[in-house]
Amino acid sequence: MDRQFLVGIGLTLMGGILWGLSGTSSQFLQQQRGITPEWLLVVRLLISGVVTVMAAYCQGRGKIFEVFKTPKDVVGVLVFGLLGMALCQYAYFRSIYYAGAGIATVLQYLAPIIIVVYMAVRYLKLPSPGEAISIVLATIGTAMIALQGKLSFEGIDEKVLFWGLLSAVAVAIYSVQPVSLLRRYGTGPIVGFAMLFSGIIITPWAKPFDVPGDWDMWTYIALFNVVVLGTIISFNAYLEGVRRIGAVKGSVLSSIEPISAALLGWALLGSEFLITDIIGFVLILSTVFILASEKSK
């Protein structure tokens, strides 16, 4: 099998797993330490952007600034940062605030369906049989894990649907929109500048110097998980994986995130597994083997 494809699968899965850690840590910061989603978002973007740009500069030196030679690509980076990364994270935080992580995750993971529809309309490209089956299995598996066996959306108000579906649209944007930029300039510069620019733009609104919440050792550890592991490493890993295997497969494999969150909840917070969790695990993990098998054929 193509080594680049296998590496892409591994990187995409790594991104999803670390997003699960980030989600657990974000919930802890908001619910138990009083950190606001606006502050968490802007700090996450600014720190991650600076570190990623510096790392990209050390690797490529002046090459990272080549993107600024083409105004169209600069606009593309801004769109990716604001409508992809920043919007995705903030909309997800807000949907958690209104409905909890379970329903918010299910709504966000409608993104693969949105991507397939976009590809079909924009490029007249239908999903392969393996992709279509994987989308269905990943969506069902995510719902079973996130909703904890209560497959009901009764009582969901308009705000929940708005923010949840908006987060799904943003996931679709950052999975599809930057692919050509990533292939031309590399993952580090594009991801780094997108984070940094979007963080700077929203700074007046989010007020990062007005620090909220209660701070102790666990607050700093959770913030490290969100910023370093759940943003710098996860976004770069996921988008490098997407660059190698494509947006549809990448968005399907990123559904490993609810498995990661469930396992971390069990290990760190004492959460219990239900039979629906195990079934969801099997359905989601099966997509890895389906996509890999189809690629080898």
Image (cartoon, rainbow, N blue to C red):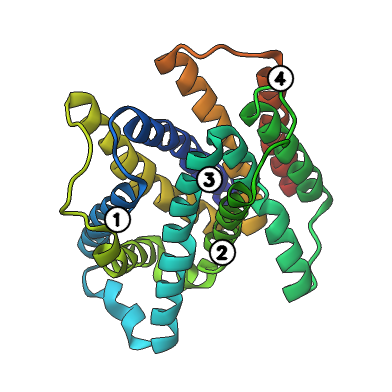
Mark 4 element type: helix
Determine whether the residue tagged by mark 3 lies in a helix, strand or loop: helix
> Residue 57: x and y, percent?
22, 65
Q: Earlier in the sequence, mark 4 or mark 2?
A: 2
Q: Earlier in the sequence, mark 4 or mark 1?
A: 1
Viewer-side label of 3, 1: 3
Name the residue: 49% across, 69% down.
Answer: 183
Q: Which residue does the numbered mark 3 point to in the structure image?
A: 95
Q: Earlier in the sequence, mark 1 or mark 2?
A: 1
Q: Secondary structure at mark 1?
A: helix
Q: Are marks 4 and 2 in contact (CB under 8 Å)?
A: no
- Amino acid type, mark 2: Ile
* Mark nearer the viewer, 4 or 3: 3
> Which residue occupies the foreground of this view, 158 or 245?
158
Q: Is residue 85 above or below residue 251?
A: below
Identify the residue position indicated by label 2 in the image: 173
In this rendering, the answer to whether 217 lies above or below 234 is above
Badge 4 density bin: few <14, some 14–19, many ≥20, Cα 10 Å: some
Q: Quadrant of residue 242?
A: bottom right
Residue type at the position of mark 4? Thr
The CA distance from mark 4 to mark 3 is 23 Å
Q: Amino acid at mark 1?
A: Val
Q: Earlier in the sequence, mark 3 or mark 1?
A: 1
Residue 42 is labelled as: 1
In the rendered image, which residue does mark 4 sit on? Answer: 276
Res. 116 mark: none
| x and y, in percent, of residue 24 in the image | 42, 30
Between the C-alphas of marks 4 and 2, the distance is 30 Å
